Amino acid sequence: MLQPKRYLFGILFIIGMVALVIGGEFVRAGLQTKTLGQTSGPVQFYLDGIWRSSLNEKAFQSLKKYSFKDVEEGKLQEGWMASDLILVSLDIKALPNDAILLFTSSSRGKSIALSWAEVKEPSNQILFTLSGRGTIKLASTYEKLNQREEWIQDMDKVEISLP
């Protein structure tokens, strides 16, 4: 009779520890989000080092879609002009041509810096597209981004530095 009670207490102890760890992780994530002042969204926008907004579904719904065929595989890449999404997400009319935008994927440790003049140029076709996993990627026909290995997949941050 003593042995079954030991097993029961052991199982309850393990369940309690798992619940404690999972609960602690939820609390930590909630505090981190409140500390940063961020709302949920796949891509966070910073202007001169200060968090300004996140990419949200409303931004996508209000804008026209564009597409191009990538040069390597000839697949159709469909998405939204990065310049349009940035302006809508930040609720601004324009940025100076010499503003620098750093597009980053923290999970992949990859980034690219482009000027606003490069981003807003329609012929560069710099798009925010959806990957097969539903994450955001920066893809383009522009010479700095026209190869798949140069694309910023799983993009989660855009930092804008004003001159």
Image (cartoon, rainbow, N blue to C red):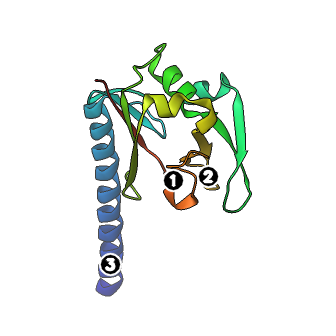
In the picture, measured across the screen, residue 87 lies left or right of residue 129, that is: left
Report how far apart the C-alphas of labels 3 and 1 lie in the structure: 52 Å
Q: Position of residue 50 (x, y in %)?
A: 27, 27
> Does residue 54 appear in the picture of this structure?
no
In the image, 110 versus 9, the foreground residue is 110
Report how far apart the C-alphas of labels 2 and 3 lie in the structure: 51 Å
Residue under label 1:
153
In the image, 114 versus 154, the foreground residue is 114
Is label 2 in contact with label 1 (beta carbons under 8 Å)? yes
Mark 1 residue element = loop
Q: Which mark is residue 131?
A: 2
Q: Which amino acid lies under the numbered mark 1 shown in the image of this protein?
A: Gln
Circle 1 crowding by C-alpha within 10 Å: few under 14, some 14–19, many from 20:
many
Circle 3 crowding by C-alpha within 10 Å: few under 14, some 14–19, many from 20:
few
Q: Residue at x 49, y 13 (%)?
A: 93
Looking at marks 3 and 1 on the same chain, the residue that comes earlier in the sequence is marked by 3
Q: Residue at x 52, y 61 (%)?
A: 149
Q: Which amino acid lies under the numbered mark 3 shown in the image of this protein?
A: Lys
Q: Which amino acid lies under the numbered mark 2 shown in the image of this protein?
A: Ser
In the picture, measured across the screen, residue 76 lies left or right of residue 1, that is: right
In the image, 42 versus 48, the foreground residue is 48
Q: Position of residue 111 (x, y in %)?
A: 39, 50
Circle 2 crowding by C-alpha within 10 Å: few under 14, some 14–19, many from 20:
some
Placement of 159 over or under 87, stated as above or below? below
Q: Which mark is residue 5?
A: 3
Is label 2 in contact with label 3 (beta carbons under 8 Å)? no
Q: Position of residue 146 (x, y in %)?
A: 58, 52
